[in-house]
């Protein structure tokens, strides 16, 4: 093993896998990937069976098991946050839902100074480049990229009831939430290929790992980045049994995600100088935005009991699991071959928002992330939460010990907008689930239950029952203002040389939906910026924008 490289990538997760593949394509460039977790072994059923995601969350073999500080507006609860502890990172343990976000998300990014090349027109070509959409490539969707996306089959009759109910409630269906029109309800794209999870590692890293110029080390936790003045020169890696190993590089790229990347920067002396000194770290570069601006999606489950035996709840019974496992192992089919999150959609909770602020995932099963089933018998549920909370949190190291997890606080439900949209979200959801389409199925609301009715009762329930959708982001935001961390034109850390960040932490604002897709797009685009390639040409394509009904464009082909 060498001790000197052209590029060190810290984190073999979603963005790190993409960059490792792209940067090592040049055989003259020596690339080292340092992953603190373990390999995603082929024999590991939990990783590769799409439906097994519930077994990995909260399991220390797969999950770093972060948790927040007591959340001051959530009754002082500590909220658990799962993060992938294997090659592929959280793409190896997530729900395999692939969503780009709304085009208006990227227009919002581009409205900030210095961010003009991150509008939707500049992002769309990278979304198309990285994907193979099995539902069909067209002017919106790619057909030859490494990320193969299957469309959810939505064959269970409860999906049919749900799609009928949303229309009865006054909402539209859409052809493709990742196409011309996100707003509406449809089957979702899944990061699944032939009944098997397709993580970022499976799509990018494993096909590239035999290159002689690419080295991948697991169980390699980076303690800090080394500097000569303002230039990064390598990293320190914690060794088993104590001590550190120093590895030099021409460039260091942090791809650890919204928690780990700001943690490594802070441990390296980059961040708010006063806070760093208080944590026992000598500041190298004062950059107050490191670890600030933390954003996430909070969500709840609204659950109904089902009076017909059509839900998937019986599949949770212990005696059924060997049969489900065997069907998946030998045939790559059955309940194990789906993530269950096969369909849902996006809606506006009020007419003041310009693009959807609510996301729905419908499941023909009543189950929590830990696999528990409060319904007992048959049931179904929607995952629901606001997309654009204006709550902001932070990630801050507690000491100079790299093994100590940072302090994390999101400040969920801390704003009036947040509280208002949560009440709207539950009322909109109840209206949908009470439509005539569910009359033959619904045996009544289980959660939150009919006793939760007033605005304050709804908020109390959210405080008690709300869980993260596992979308932490924005802690090293791109931009040019004083709280920005990353140069949007180079992905370099402001004021430093030889160090960049590429992951969800660089988002200036969270996107509308699950984050895996946007993270991979950012990594694809960042690869060109890092290599000095000519970026893909902008694709100025008109996308759906909400207008008054009389002003809406005719777009029957699209939605």
Image (cartoon, rainbow, N blue to C red):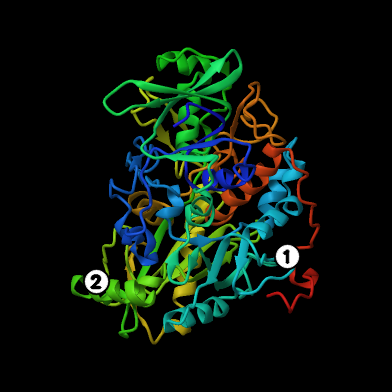
Q: Is residue 178 depicted above or below 205 in this figure?
A: below
> Can you say which quadrant of the picture contains the N terminus?
top left
Position of 238 with respect to 258 (left or right) is left
Identify the residue under disc 1.
544
Write the residue at 55% across / 80% down. 168
Write the residue at 34% across / 79% down. 311
Write the residue at 33% across / 71% down. 329
Q: Residue furthest front?
A: 212
Residue 285 lies, in percent from the top left, at 57, 17
> Which residue is at the front of the view, 508 or 51?
51
- Quarter-wise, where is residue 304 in the image? bottom left
Q: Is residue 390 visible?
A: no
Write the residue at 79% across / 62% down. 542
Q: Is residue 434 depicted above or below 455 in this figure?
A: below
Nearer the observer: mark 2 or 1; the answer is 2
Identify the residue under disc 2.
321
Q: Is residue 21 depicted above or below 440 in this figure?
A: above
Position of 501 with respect to 162 (left or right) is right
- Quarter-wise, where is residue 134 in the image? bottom right
Q: Is residue 499 depicted above or below 124 in this figure?
A: above
> Which residue is at the front of the view, 280 or 336?
336
| Circle 2 SS class | helix
| Circle 1 SS class | loop
Gap between marks 2 and 1 measured at Cα: 43 Å
Residue 415 lies, in percent from the top left, at 51, 42
Residue 449 lies, in percent from the top left, at 32, 66
Q: Is residue 351 visible?
A: yes
């Amino acid at each position: 093993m060498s001790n000197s490289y052209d590029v060190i990538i810290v984190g073999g997760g979603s963005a790190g896998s993409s960059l490792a593949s792209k940067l090592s394509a040049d055989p003259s460039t020596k690339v080292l990937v340092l992953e603190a977790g373990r390999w995603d072994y082929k024999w590991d059923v939990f990783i590769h069976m799409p439906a097994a995601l519930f077994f990995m969350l909260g399991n220390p073999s797969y999950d770093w098991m972060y948790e927040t500080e007591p959340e001051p507006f959530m009754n002082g609860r500590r909220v658990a946050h799962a993060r992938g502890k294997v090659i592929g990172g959280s793409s190896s343990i997530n729900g395999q839902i692939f969503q780009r976000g709304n085009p208006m998300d990227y227009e919002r990014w581009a409205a900030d100074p210095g961010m003009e090349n991150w509008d939707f027109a500049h992002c769309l070509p990278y979304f198309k480049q990285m994907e193979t959409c099995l539902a069909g490539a067209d002017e919106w969707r790619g057909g030859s990229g490494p990320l193969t996306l299957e469309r959810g089959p939505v064959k269970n009759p409860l999906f049919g009831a749900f799609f009928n109910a949303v229309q009865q409630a006054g909402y539209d269906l859409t052809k493709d939430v990742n196409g011309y029109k996100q707003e509406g309800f449809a089957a979702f794209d899944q990061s699944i290929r032939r009944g098997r999870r397709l993580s970022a590692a499976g799509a990018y890293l494993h096909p590239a790992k035999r290159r002689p110029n690419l080295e991948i080390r697991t169980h390699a936790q980076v303690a800090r980045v080394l500097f000569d003045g303002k230039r990064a020169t390598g990293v320190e890696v914690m060794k088993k049994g104590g001590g550190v190993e120093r590895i030099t590089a021409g460039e260091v790229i942090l791809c650890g995600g919204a928690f780990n990347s700001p943690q490594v920067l802070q441990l390296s002396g980059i961040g708010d100088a006063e806070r760093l000194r208080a944590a026992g770290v000598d500041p190298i570069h004062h950059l107050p935005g490191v670890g600030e601006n933390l954003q996430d999606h909070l969500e709840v489950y609204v659950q109904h009991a089902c009076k017909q035996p059509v839900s998937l709840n019986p599949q949770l019974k212990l005696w059924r699991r060997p049969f489900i496992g065997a069907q998946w192992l030998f045939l790559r089919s059955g309940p194990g071959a789906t993530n269950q999150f096969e369909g849902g959609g996006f809606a506006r909770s009020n007419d003041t928002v310009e693009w959807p602020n609510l996301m729905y995932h419908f499941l023909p099963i009543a189950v929590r992330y830990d696999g528990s089933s409060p319904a007992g018998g048959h049931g179904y549920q929607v995952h629901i939460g606001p997309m654009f909370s204006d709550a902001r949190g932070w990630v801050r190291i507690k000491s100079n010990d790299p093994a100590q997890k940072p302090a994390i606080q999101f400040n969920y439900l801390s704003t009036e907008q947040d509280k208002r949209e949560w009440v709207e979200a539950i009322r909109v959801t109840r209206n949908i689930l009470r439509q005539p389409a569910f009359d033959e199925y619904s045996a009544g609301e289980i959660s939150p239950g009919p006793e939760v009715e007033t605005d304050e009762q709804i908020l109390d329930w959210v405080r008690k029952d709300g869980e993260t959708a596992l979308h932490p982001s924005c802690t090293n935001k791109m931009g040019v203002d004083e709280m920005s961390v990353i140069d949007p034109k180079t992905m370099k850390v402001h004021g430093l040389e030889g160090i960049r960040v590429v992951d969800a932490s660089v988002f200036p604002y969270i996107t509308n939906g699950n984050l895996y897709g946007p993270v991979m797009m950012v990594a694809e685009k960042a690869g060109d910026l890092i290599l000095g390639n000519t970026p893909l040409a902008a694709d100025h394509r008109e996308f759906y924008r909400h207008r008054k009904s009389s002003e809406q464009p005719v777009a029957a082909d699209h939605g």
